[in-house]
Image (cartoon, grey):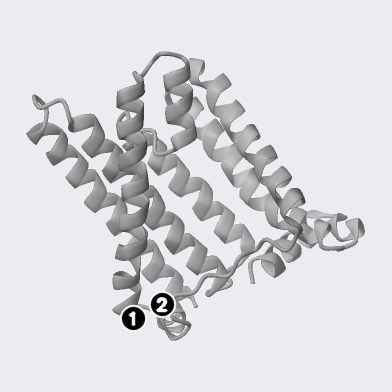
Amino acid sequence: MPADVAVSVVVLVGIVALSYVTRRLSTRALADTGVSEYAAEFVSTFQLCCCAHELKVLSEVGRIDPRLALTFTYLITVIHGFTFNGAIGNPTGVLECAYRSRLTRGRAFRRIACEFAAAAASRAAVPLIWGVGLSGIHVRHKLHDFQCISPVHAPLPQAAAVEFACAFAVQTVITYTRSIGGRSHVHAVAAIITTVVYAVPLQWKLLSGIQPGLLAGPHHGYDELRAAVR
């Protein structure tokens, strides 16, 4: 298992490094064309989605310790924040910028189109990485035809309510910490995202009938998170 985790770390580092180089080169090459921001948006969203796919497989298939999974989530979110270079990587964030007149509707639409295209590209790209079989986790995932397991085990209205609450919490932190800028903003966003990643699987379990007493302490919480992502 440690070797499999090391392989996933190398994959994550490789994705971030390749995206960083591509973003820098494309920004320079397209500096005078007016489309450099869309190239950065595409590459950054591709980076985010590929890393999310790898972390999801590491948790679901590798079943690593939840504390390690949360650590990876926090670190990779911080890395995204420091490397995106003006990209947003989230349609909700783009819509907020359009609402606040920081982006025109045309620019916002084109950015969102780039984000959806990057998400689709990542779904096509990561199976190619996993198919190489660099680790036992990737091999097992390939044997299951790259199928991911949904952690949602609740009726649609309740699931939608939980997702809405989490999205609201994340967007609120992003909005109200933007003014502080710099590293503090990035770490605040990473902290709320990591908190949501920890809390949501527990909510699914509670909505499915798990007794609240299981949340008596951190150890039980991590056990629940491990069970939720299996």
Q: Secondary structure at mark 2?
A: helix
As measured in the structure, the alpha-carbon distance from the residue carrying label 1 to the one carrying label 2 is: 5 Å
Quadrant housing the C terminus: bottom right
Residue at position x 78%, y 61% in the image: 205
* Residue 83 falls left or right of residue 146: left
- Can residue 46 be seen by looking at this rendering? no
Q: Quadrant of residue 142?
A: bottom left
Q: Picture coordinates of residue 172 (x, y %)?
A: 61, 27
37, 98: nearer the viewer: 98
* Residue 121 falls left or right of residue 156: left
The residue under label 2 is: 138
Q: Secondary structure at mark 1?
A: loop
- Disc ID at residue 117: none
Residue at position x 17%, y 38% in the image: 24
- The kind of residue on which mark 2 rests is His
Q: Mark 1–mark 2 contact, CB under 8 Å? A: yes
As drawn, the residue found furthest toward the bottom would be 143
204, 1: nearer the viewer: 204
Q: Picture coordinates of residue 191 (x, y %)?
A: 58, 39
Q: Picture coordinates of residue 36 (x, y %)?
A: 18, 31
Indicate which disc, 1 or 2, sits on the residue closer to the N terminus: 1
The residue under label 1 is: 133
Q: Picture coordinates of residue 94 (x, y %)?
A: 42, 29
Q: Quadrant of residue 120?
A: bottom left
- Can residue 123 be seen by looking at this rendering? yes
Give above or below for 127 relative to 70: below
- The kind of residue on which mark 1 rests is Gly
